[in-house]
Amino acid sequence: MNGLSKGQRNASEAAWVDVDEGGADQRIDNFLTRILKGVPKSHLYRLLRTGQVRVNSRRVDAAYRVQIGDRVRIPPVRTARRLGSLEQRRPAAPLLAQRVLLEDDWLIAIDKPAGLAVHGGSGISRGVIEQLRAERPQQRFLELVHRLDRETSGVLLVAKKRSALIALQDQLREGAVDKRYLVLATGHWQARRREVQLALRKSVTAQGERRVSVDREGQAAHTIFTLREKFAEYALLEAQLLTGRTHQIRVHLAHLGCPVAQDDKYGDFARNRAMAREGLKRMFLHAARLEFTHPARSERIAVEAPLPPDLAGFLDRLRAQAAA
């Protein structure tokens, strides 16, 4: 994606952006999000509806996918941080630079910290993908391959080429990616291994909160839980996701009566308060391992993220209590 044309960088003027390989096949609304930093999506949709954004001098809707060679008209938007030349963009503070687990010309695997959303929106100005783009202004293409909940830590894949993005997302859809999480379940877990196949349905409450529940009419969801370590009132489990539904591990465990420790949506709220006093301040869910076929080579790649200090420290306290 090229910068604004010379002489068209004045905030009072419309600008034209030529689409290159870095932007090809993106929806126009996502393309605009990357150019007009900080502008709400509702405003971008308004610009599209009113014809202020045009592609090759024609009106398009939000679902249009830009192609190499398209010329996109960007109207003047005062609240936007306009896209200048790549050389003029200043890198952000390197929040993620030390969290790279694996990188090559095709992808980046990051150990995402808990508390950081994967993308901005809903009051969050910058997520992982926005932060990564800000840290690497010379990188022409960076897109999330998949997502993790804001409070979930661990392995997150980002594609550096559109072909890598498509190949990896195809693997996810086909179940060819081996996803393993470490999760601390509350209550009295008994099974050494338990296979759970419970369909999940998404809904929105009257207050606008997104919820997921077990429902036979929902989407198929398949999780295999394996016991790693047992404590008096907790169990450390490895969860293998055979499908990738929203909140899948959390809802499956809550339905079984053993919710994730410190889950503020589906958990045991009284126990959560007690755990906070004992030192666990956030949800104990960590994307520990991801195995996939490299998008440019036939070899299988396995990426692992160590358990973060806050979660490892809580486990150590449980072990010390058990030993005592």
Image (spheres, rainbow, N blue to C red):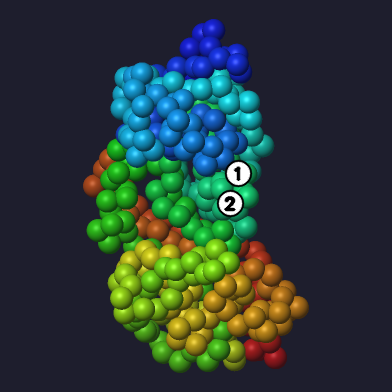
Residue type for callout 2? Ser
Q: Nearer the viewer, residue 132 or 178?
A: 132
**Whether residue 238 is visible:** no
Distance (Cα) linking label 1 and label 2? 10 Å
Give the residue type at disc 1: Arg
Tag 2: Cα neighbours inside 10 Å, few (<14), some, or many (≥20)? few
Where is residue 299 drawn, in percent x and y? 27, 49
Q: Residue 319 occupies which quadrant of the picture?
A: bottom right
Q: Quadrant of the N terminus?
A: top left
At x 40%, y 87%, the residue is: 192
Query: Left or right: 321 with respect to 287?
Result: right
Name the residue: 43% across, 34% down. Answer: 49
- Element on which disc 1 rests: loop
In the displayed structure, 102 sits above or below 91; it is below
Q: Residue at x 64, y 34 (%)?
A: 92
Question: Which residue is denoted by mark 1 in the rendering?
Answer: 126
Residue 113, quarter of the rendered image: bottom right
Q: Are marks 1 and 2 in contact (CB under 8 Å)?
A: no
Residue 39: horizontal and vertical position, in percent? 58, 36
Q: Check disc 1: other Cα within 10 Å, few if <14, some if 14-19, many if 20+.
A: some
Left or right of 190, for residue 279? right
The single residue placed furthest to the top in the displayed view is 7
Query: Number of labelled discs?
Result: 2
Residue 115 in the image, given as x and y percentages of width and height: 62, 57
| Residue to which mark 2 is pinned | 122
- The residue shown at (32%, 50%) is 169
Q: Secondary structure at mark 2?
A: loop
